[in-house]
């Protein structure tokens, strides 16, 4: 009151204008203080992620193969700066929760490059159970964190390092993401029709360039082969089977990312954030870390360089197809990594270390000419398989003296079914594995149309 009587500077009572001005000054000071506090909090919340405290480089004894020689030098585990690796998993609830989409990605913030390599779900890995596809590992260990840790371990044996973070996406979320960005323009490569009566699921897409909403995008990504209206399979879909499906998925992801970056706005960000929080599980990163990655990509790194589509690439793991006999389900289709090409691609695009990875750091499966299996790491996890194959081979080559000429029907029943010719596709359906290995044998729906001996070119 005394101040009001004296006025500003002791010259008398405050005028109305002076009272308003003082109120504005107080309000501005308050807003500035709140903004400063919010800015400090935001800077503390949006932060660069820390690398997880885990062994990130698989270790294996490095022994010299020459008498009296010394072991090869151990490579360094020193990391590249601001280089992060991600294991991105797509879980398909229609396929029993198998990890049918596996992407290994690396984001180099310093150079603003993003590379992702798709690991086919039929990749053979060194496990103890009968059907050795990589997409079975997660469920074989009961899912959850235990299953994810086991999958990351298998990935590390394939590529020589353990991914820093994992991102698990439920398949249904992809359609919601597409709707959130207003659809994706895409050139559908062929007419697609498939009617799954058991799951009440229909794929019905025309060939050509068109705007795909979330539902049509899911149809495109799920497509494997065509059927008639009664659900009878008509063909094997893509000429190169599951590898063709992977290629189309990569092309669609590239188109979706490019179109998303072109029309990003606050409303789209909010919609994407909602879908992300409801359908995506991230291990090792919090929301502030994710915002930091987005900030670096869209607004630029410390040098002002942004991530553009010219530096975003997708590729498929270099591999070749192979049929391998199962103890429970006949011949199975697998893909096996082409080691030299895989190592070259990883070192060029995904390796987080300063030193190059070496092929002797990997544990890659291979098939011998007699049908037995081997692993470059030296130890086969399935200790029964090779003995079973050798016994089967011995029985097949035995030539007992026949007592009578069997009838054609008897010959067909007793004859051991040979592996299919390299140019022949697998039948459309194969029996599911028996319960021999428990959860490890449960494969869910799988594509058996992949052609054998089909190398996959790397497209950097």
Image: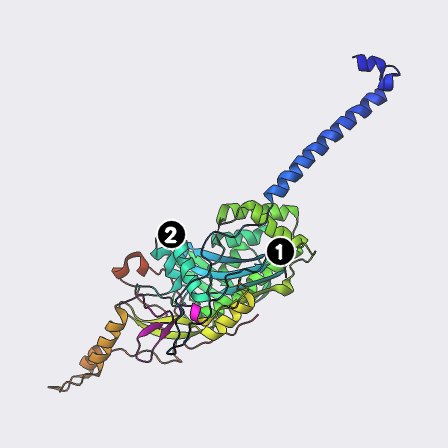
| Viewer-proximal residue among 70 and 78 | 70
Query: Decide: marks 2, 1 in contact (CB < 8 A)?
Result: no
Query: Where is residue 259 shown, x and y percent of the image?
Result: 63, 58
| Viewer-proximal residue among 322 and 368 | 368
Rendered view: 176 above or below 60: above
Per the model, the C-alpha gap separating discs 2 and 1 is: 34 Å
Query: Where is residue 348 shown, x and y percent of the image?
Result: 56, 69
User: 354 left or right of 153?
Assistant: right
| Viewer-proximal residue among 292 and 57 | 57
Which residue position is annotated with label 2?
A: 146
> Residue shown at 40%/67% (left/top)?
122
Which residue position is annotated with label 1?
A: 260
Query: Where is residue 126 shown, x and y percent of the image?
Result: 35, 66
Q: Tell me the tag on residue 84.
A: none
User: 129 left or right of 73?
Assistant: left
> Residue shown at 31%/61% (left/top)?
441
Question: Which quarter of the rendered picture does the N terminus lie within?
Answer: top right
Q: Using the rendered image of the protein, determine whether residue 272 is visible from the camera's viewpoint.
A: no
Q: What range of the chain is rendered magenta? A: 360-383
| Viewer-proximal residue among 314 and 164 | 164
Question: Which quarter of the rendered picture does the C terminus lie within?
Answer: bottom right
The kind of secondary structure the magenta stretch mainly shows is: loop
Q: Is 131 a magenta residue? A: no
């Amino acid at each position: 009151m005394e101040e009001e009587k004296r006025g500003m500077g002791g010259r008398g009572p405050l005028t109305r204008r002076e009272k308003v001005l003082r109120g504005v000054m107080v309000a501005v000071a308050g807003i500035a203080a709140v903004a400063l506090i919010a800015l400090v909090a935001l800077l503390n919340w949006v932060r660069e992620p820390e690398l997880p405290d885990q062994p990130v480089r698989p270790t294996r004894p490095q022994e010299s193969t020459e008498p009296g020689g010394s072991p090869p030098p151990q490579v360094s585990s020193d990391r590249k700066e601001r280089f992060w690796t991600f294991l991105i998993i797509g879980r398909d609830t229609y396929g029993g929760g198998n990890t049918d989409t596996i992407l290994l990605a690396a984001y180099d913030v310093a150079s603003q490059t993003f590379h992702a390599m798709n690991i086919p779900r039929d990749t053979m890995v060194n496990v103890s159970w009968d059907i050795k596809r990589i997409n079975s590992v997660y469920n074989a260990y009961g899912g959850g964190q235990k299953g994810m840790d086991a999958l990351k371990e298998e990935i590390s044996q394939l590529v020589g390092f353990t991914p820093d973070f994992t991102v698990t996406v439920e398949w249904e979320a992809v359609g919601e993401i597409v709707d959130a960005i207003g659809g994706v323009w895409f050139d559908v490569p062929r007419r697609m029709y498939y009617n799954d009566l058991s799951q009440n699921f229909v794929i019905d897409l025309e060939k050509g360039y068109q705007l795909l909403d979330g539902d049509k995008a899911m149809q495109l990504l799920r497509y494997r082969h065509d059927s008639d209206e009664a659900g009878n399979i008509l063909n094997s879909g893509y000429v190169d089977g599951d590898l063709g499906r992977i290629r189309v998925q990569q092309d669609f992801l590239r188109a979706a990312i490019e179109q998303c970056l072109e029309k990003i706005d606050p409303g789209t960000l909010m919609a994407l954030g909602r879908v992300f929080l409801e359908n995506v599980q991230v291990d090792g990163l919090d929301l502030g870390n994710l915002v930091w990655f987005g900030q670096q990509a869209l607004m630029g790194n410390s040098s002002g360089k942004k991530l553009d589509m010219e530096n975003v690439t997708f590729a498929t793991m270099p591999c070749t197809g192979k049929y391998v006999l199962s103890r429970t389900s006949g011949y199975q289709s697998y893909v096996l990594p082409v080691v030299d090409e895989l190592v070259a691609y990883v070192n060029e695009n995904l390796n987080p270390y300063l030193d190059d990875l070496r092929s002797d750091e990997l544990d890659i499966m291979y098939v011998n000419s007699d049908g037995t299996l081997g692993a470059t790491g030296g130890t086969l996890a399935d200790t029964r398989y090779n003995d079973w194959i050798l016994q089967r081979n011995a029985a097949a080559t035995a030539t007992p003296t026949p007592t009578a000429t069997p009838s054609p029907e008897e010959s067909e029943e007793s004859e051991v079914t040979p592996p299919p010719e390299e140019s022949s596709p697998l039948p459309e359906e194969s029996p599911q594995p028996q319960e021999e290995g428990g959860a490890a044998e449960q494969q869910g729906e799988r594509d058996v149309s992949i052609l054998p001996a089909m190398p996959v070119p790397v497209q950097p």
